[in-house]
Amino acid sequence: MKTLAEEAGALRRLLEGLSTRLDELAVQMEKAQLKDYVNLMSRPWQLIWRNWLSGIARGIGIALGFTFFAATIVWLLQILGALNLPIIGDYIAEIVKIVQRQLEIEHY
């Protein structure tokens, strides 16, 4: 039979193990930011606002990126057109003229 001191020691070790595991669980929940997620889900208008802002930012980023990419392509085509390559040069010059004409047209 176990003595009272042995049972108390075993119980103490068990409680210390549970306490350690509970601390680890609390740290993991903090890392998962579960509280912030629950708060966000309980406020649907805040969720809609955040999603709307992220959509606007994503759209602006795509527009700016595509504009930079298209401008770079037109610039490279102008350089290739200036080289007067035999067959390709005529096509490139025509493409550049079309793009420049489109830029000069007033859009309403």
Image (tube, grey):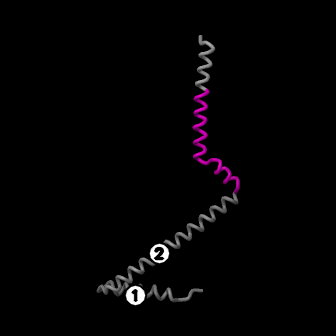
Q: Earlier in the sequence, mark 1 or mark 2?
A: 2
Horizontal and vertical percent position of residue 53: 62, 65
Q: Is residue 20 magenta?
A: yes
In the displayed structure, 19 sits above or below 55; it is above
Quarter of the figure with residue 94:
bottom left
Horizontal and vertical percent position of residue 21: 58, 34
Residue in front for this viewpoint, 23 or 74: 23
What is the CA distance from the residue labelled 1 to the residue labelled 2? 21 Å
First to last magenta residue range:
15-43
Say which residue appears at 51% left-offset and 73% top-offset: 64
What residue type is disc 2 on?
A: Phe
Horizontal and vertical percent position of residue 27: 59, 41
35 left or right, relative to 63: right
Horizontal and vertical percent position of residue 87: 30, 85
Secondary structure at numbered mark 2 = helix
Mark 1 vs mark 2: give the one in front: 2
Packing grade of label 1 (10 A; few <14, some 14-19, many >=20) is few
Farthest left residue? Answer: 86
| Residue linked to disc 1 | 94
| Residue linked to disc 2 | 68
Say which residue appears at 47% left-offset and 75% top-offset: 68
